[in-house]
Image (tube, rainbow, N blue to C red):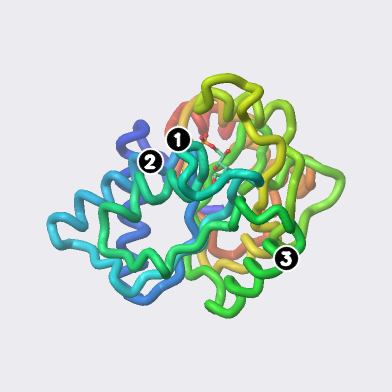
Amino acid sequence: IRIVRVRDYEDMSRQVANIISAQIILKPNCVLGLATGSTPIGAYQQLVEWYKKGDVDFSQVSSYNLDEYRGLNGDDPQSYRYFMNENLFNHVNINIENTHVPDGSNPDADATCAEYDAMVAAAGYQDLQLLGIGNNGHIGFNEPDDHFSYGTHCVDLTESTIEANSRLFDKIEDVPRQAYTMGTHTIMSARAIVVAANGEKKAQAVHDMVYGPITPSCPASILQLHSNVILVADEAALSLCK
Ligand code: F6R
């Protein structure tokens, strides 16, 4: 895992946006794996700015998001589909039909997940996968467990994730308890992976991802087995990596 040290959130966002736009310039019809959460918002804003200046063209890009809450419709403001539309897709010239997020409104978990994996595979997998990392080392919604997941699947969210995500909901009871997420194999199929992390809360997870044993109790540690991973992280997130 290659580490790029940055000063702060703004710096991280610009670096991540640079990597994504370089990918789009190198391969205009690339497949991007995208993430939600607080971490990538700044990078998406930067990409929107560059798009408006004419520096990046999304017209041939397609995208596959990591995850979606089970039980939420795409027009629900808490859904990840809504987040992506609001933070990126509505502001650039991506063809919305080429953007994909697991269908949280489909209660049939097996069908939803199998279909999603088939689509990612048919697209030839991600040229570049963007990841954030959970405080507990999760990637996508692959939570600490006694085994690594494989394909896209339905998960029960852990209390710590529900609590971390409750900041975006009115009350904690509103946070969905389940999600559809790309599995470890789906994520590792990407040809390049960029992980973004900022803030002290991520320090332990970032340390364990880079230097810890490869174990499903820190799902991000599997990234050590991928040959093309860049971690863009600020000093606080790297504070336990000496
Ligand atoms: C988001 C996702 C999650 C987040 C992680 C970090 O699509 O899959 O794994 O990347 O929970 O979240 P933030 O960025 O809010 O700290």
Residue at 52% x, 21% y is 170
Residue to which mark 2 is pinned: 41
Q: Are marks 1 and 2 in contact (CB under 8 Å)?
A: yes
Question: Counting residues from the N terminus, which is met first, the one under dot 3 or under dot 1?
Answer: 1
Q: Residue 74: x, y in percent?
A: 50, 50
Q: What is the number of the mark on residue 120? A: none
| Distance (Cα) linking label 3 and label 1 | 29 Å
- 143 with respect to 229 (left or right): right
Tell me the number on the disc at residue 111: 3
Say above or below: 134 vs 163: below
Above or below, 108 against 176 in this view is below
Whole-angstrom CA distance, mark 2 to mark 3, is: 30 Å
Secondary element at image label 1: loop
- Which residue is drawn at the image coordinates 65% and 53% (left, top)? 181
Q: Position of residue 240 (x, y in %)?
A: 58, 29
Residue 22 position, x and y percent, is 31, 64
| Residue 42 found in image quarter | top left
Tell me if label 3 and label 1 are in contact, CB under 8 Å.
Answer: no
User: Which numbered tag is attached to residue 38?
Assistant: 1
Residue type at mark 1 is Ser
Label 3 near ligand 1 (CB < 8 Å): no
* Vertical comparison of 59 with 156: above or below: below
Crowd band around label 1 with a 10 angstrom C-alpha radius: few (<14), some (14–19), many (20+): few
Amino acid type indicated by mark 2: Ile
